[in-house]
Image (cartoon, rainbow, N blue to C red):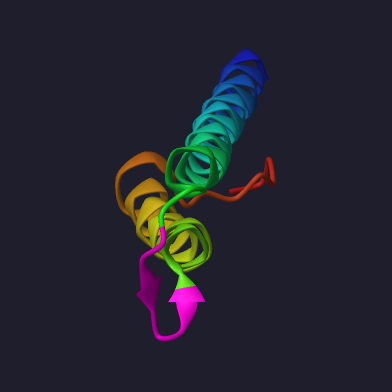
Amino acid sequence: MNSKHNQYAKKFIQMDKEALYTLILSLVIFVFFWGAIFILQNTQTFIWQMPLWFVVSCIGGYLLSVIGVAVLIKYFMKDFDLDDNK
């Protein structure tokens, strides 16, 4: 019984780590999004008839999100069953 409890507890520790990594990624994306707007707000450059700050913050933020989630899934997330019977 104790071994099952330890394995169950280890799964929760892994879930806590995954939640922390996800929080860190969301903060990186948040800083990138608002940083791009703040840094590029006064530029007169346009891409596809949209201001540079919009392209970098929105489209770049989306691409950063997709890449970040792919990295999280590949390197930090683990696939396991929470069920005790496994």
Residue 21 pos. (x, y %):
49, 32
**Residue 14 appears at what percent x and percent y?**
52, 29
The residue depicted at 59 percent of the width and 32 percent of the height is 23
Question: Front-most of 1 and 11?
Answer: 11
Q: Report which quarter residue 82 is drawn in.
A: top right
Image: 2 above or below 22: above
- x 44%, y 45%: residue: 77
Occupied quadrant, residue 9: top right
Report if residue 46 lies within the magenta region.
yes
Give the x, y percent position of residue 67: 35, 59
Q: Nearer the viewer, residue 37 or 45?
A: 45
Magenta range: 44-50
Q: How many marks?
A: 0
Q: Is 17 in the magenta?
A: no
The one of 18 and 42 positioned closer to us in this rendering: 42
Query: Where does the image place residue 49, in percent across and percent down from the top left?
Result: 46, 84
| Residue at 53%, 38% in the rendered image | 38
Quarter in which the N terminus is drawn? top right
Q: Is residue 37 above or below residue 1?
A: below
